[in-house]
Image (cartoon, grey):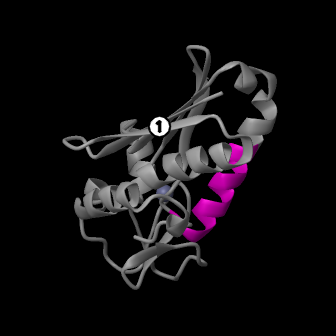
Amino acid sequence: MKLNGAGKRPVRRDRLIRERNHDTYMARSKYREPTVCPDCGVVYHKGRWQWIARPEGAHETLCPACQRMHDRYPGGFLTLSGEFLAKHHDEIVHLARNVEEREKSQHPLQRIMALEPHDDGILITTTQMEMARAIGDAVHHAYQGELDYRYTDEANILRVSWRR
Ligand SMILES: [Zn+2]
């Protein structure tokens, strides 16, 4: 899977994530073609999920992203916290939503699952780790602060935290 803007960040971290990136929700079943997701309307066509018009006679099965939402099983966690966040809350949430729109348009299975208050900040859960990472990177790029990544190997989950 292509990681957006990977060249800008240190090589070691990118390689770690890319090598270990295997989505168990993708491998779980083979989809017949064409298949449409009844929840979000994304279409499985030519071996991948795409935002295209619903083909005639399409099968219906939940896409991996909606399946994760039903299971409440995120692939990525991003916590945002700190005094700066508190003062710029709406602005930063807006940025997160913009990043989601951009990423989702290119990678249909990457979504925000939930965005909710958490301790002294916000917890954003995402269907895939790349989305947590993309939002964390965008917030860090826009506002500096401290950004940290923790990858949990056994669960194939990425936890990103940003603080300022
Ligand atoms: Zn779906």
Is residue 101 covered in magenta? yes
Instruction: Report which quarter residue 44 is drawn in.
Output: bottom left
Residue under the point 65% across and 50% down: 138
Residue under the point 51% across and 59% down: 9
Is residue 44 covered in magenta? no
Q: Give whichever of 60, 8 is nearer the camera.
A: 8
Q: Give whichever of 52, 138 is nearer the camera.
A: 138
Residue under label 1, please give it: 148
Q: Give whichever of 1, 141 is nearer the camera.
A: 141
Asked if residue 67 shows in the view, the reply is: yes
| Disc 1 residue lies near ligand 1 with CB under 8 A | no
Residue 122, how many percent across, how many down?
Answer: 61, 26
Residue under the point 74% across and 25% down: 84
Q: Residues within 10 Å of mark 1 (few under 14, many from 20)?
A: some
* Quarter of the rendering occupied by the C terminus: top right
In the current view of this chain or complex, which residue is farthest to the top? 119
Q: Is residue 160 above or below residue 164?
A: below
Residue 128, how many percent across, how many down?
Answer: 43, 51
Residue under the point 27% across and 63% down: 19
Whether residue 155 sits left or right of residue 79 in the image: it is left
Asked if residue 42 shows in the view, the reply is: no
Q: Give whichever of 28, 24 is nearer the camera.
A: 24
Residue range of the region highlighted in magenta in the rendering: 95-108
**Amino acid type at image mark 1:** Asp
